[in-house]
Amino acid sequence: MSTSAVFAAAGEYQETTCTAELTSQSCDVCFTGEKIAPGAQITGFFDSWTNKNQSEQIIYRDEQVMPEMVALSSGTVFTANPLDPESFWKFGSAVIWTDSATGTGKQEFMLDAGKTVRFIEADLGASYTLTSTDKAGGEVVGVLKFPLNYHNVDADGNEGAKETHMECVAYTADIATVTPVETVQPTPEPKQMTTVKT
């Protein structure tokens, strides 16, 4: 089974339980991202892949799908810079693609048992900006999805069917809640009654 951890510039994200909101996004493993306010920019993403099997795992370049930020409400908008996912993301420098030995013309990368590689990362300067949201403070505004398509290889060198592992980082709204201030109206002093002199 492939497991990997998602990191960002702020440091390693903490793994958390996948809520129904996240499992609906096909998330297998979930992490808590930072709180972001409208207008805030986040950057520095990367995803590492660890092969915890006793034998190799193989991935094919043409089976990979670039990560994406998914807004979780119709009133939430994220802006990517650059817009093109192929320009936003790049494979890690240790991921060296080679022509498949099977003669299929595909490019492949094989990860040995027990090894970890930085698989994919945002290019320098690539970022997401939370343009707007209708979510309240503390609610999940967006999910950054990191898919990995891979094949297990058994001890005899037989390649298994394609499997997909989806890691998700949930970002929450950083919006201050405004507490209404109760206005106390001063009690007017009673007017002094004038006495009529006779």
Image (cartoon, grey):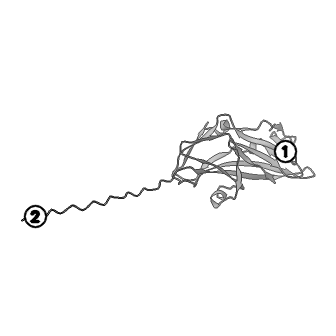
Image side of residue 56 versus residue 129, left or right: right
Helix, strand or loop status at disc 1:
strand
Q: Which residue is mark 2?
A: 196
Task: Residue at 92%, 52% (x, y): give it.
Answer: 155
User: Is residue 158 in view from this perspective?
Assistant: yes
How far across and down, in percent of the image, does residue 194 sit? 15, 62
Of the two numbered discs 2 and 1 on the same chain, state the one appearing first in sequence.
1
Q: Nearer the viewer, residue 109 or 33?
A: 33
Instruction: Report crowding for label 2: few under 14, some 14 to 19, many 20 or more residues within 10 A (C-alpha).
Output: few
Identify the secondary structure beneath mark 2. loop
| Mark 1: amino acid | Leu
Q: Residue at x 38, y 57 (%)?
A: 183
Q: Is residue 65 visible?
A: no
Report the front residue among 174 and 143.
174
Residue 9 image position (x, y, % from top left): 68, 41
Figure quadrant of the N terminus: bottom right
Residue most extreme to the right = 156
Please state which of residues 115 and 35 is positioned toward the viewer in this rendering.
35
The residue at 10%/64% (across/down) is 196
- Which quadrant holds residue 67? top right
Q: Which residue is mark 1?
A: 111
In the drawing, what numbered circle is on residue 31? none
Where residue 33 sits: x, y (%)? 65, 49
In this rendering, the count of numbered labels is 2
Identify the image quadrant of residue 61.
top right
Q: Position of residue 169 (x, y in %)?
A: 67, 50
Q: Nearer the viewer, mark 2 or mark 1?
A: 2
The amino acid on which the numbered mark 2 sits, given as a three-letter code, is: Val
